[in-house]
Amino acid sequence: MRRLLLAAALLGSVAQATVAPKLSLTEQARKAQVIVQARVAAVTAQERDGQRWTVYRLNLVETLAGNAASLPVIDNTPAMWVLEGVENAPTLRVNDEAVLLLYTGLMDSPVVGFNQGIYRIANARVEGGDPAELAAFKAALLRARGSQ
């Protein structure tokens, strides 16, 4: 019985390790090394150092903050690399457009807050954005970064 309880406790702590704390938009903007508005040009699988990755090639619409040239690249195209098999990892499709708040390094998910820093765009509106109007949302991000 003790072994069962110990195993359950260990599994519970592992499951919790993948949960990111909820971040405010200001916290996300301050943590992001790069903020871009981008459209997904292609989604491919790549192997690197024995690990499989989903690679999202990005067509940059606008760089809002940071140096987009510091993002990982594939075939001279900025890309977002997400480790395959990670529970609740962010997913995008070809032609999806979003404001992306990113770290520049190669990690399980480069999206700030694990997947909180993806704000999909449809008809100049930001899904889950506050404010929802695209120009106002981008202005709010820049204000948040400016108050660092």
Image (tube, rainbow, N blue to C red):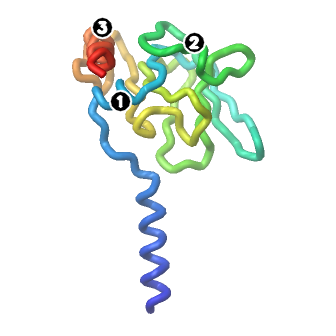
Secondary structure found at label 2: strand
Above-or-below relation of 53 to 147: below
Q: How crowded is mark 3: few (under 14 residues within 10 Å), some or many (20 or more)?
A: few
* Relative to 87, 119 lies left or right: left
* Relative to 45, 135 lies left or right: left
**Residue 69: x percent and y percent?**
60, 14
Residue identifier under label 3: 135
Q: Do the residues labelled 2 and 1 touch (CB within 8 Å)?
A: no
Secondary structure found at label 3: helix
Residue identifier under label 2: 59
Determine which quarter of the picture holds residue 30: top left
Q: How crowded is mark 1: few (under 14 residues within 10 Å), some or many (20 or more)?
A: many
Determine which quarter of the picture holds residue 128: top left
Which mark is first along the chain, 2 or 3? Answer: 2
In the image, 33 versus 136, the foreground residue is 33
Q: State the separation of the CA atoms marked 2 and 1.
A: 22 Å
Outermost residue toward the bottom? 1
Above-or-below relation of 2 to 125: below
**Residue 57: x percent and y percent?**
62, 21
Q: State the separation of the CA atoms marked 1 and 3.
A: 18 Å
Residue identifier under label 1: 28
* Relative to 126, 100 lies left or right: right
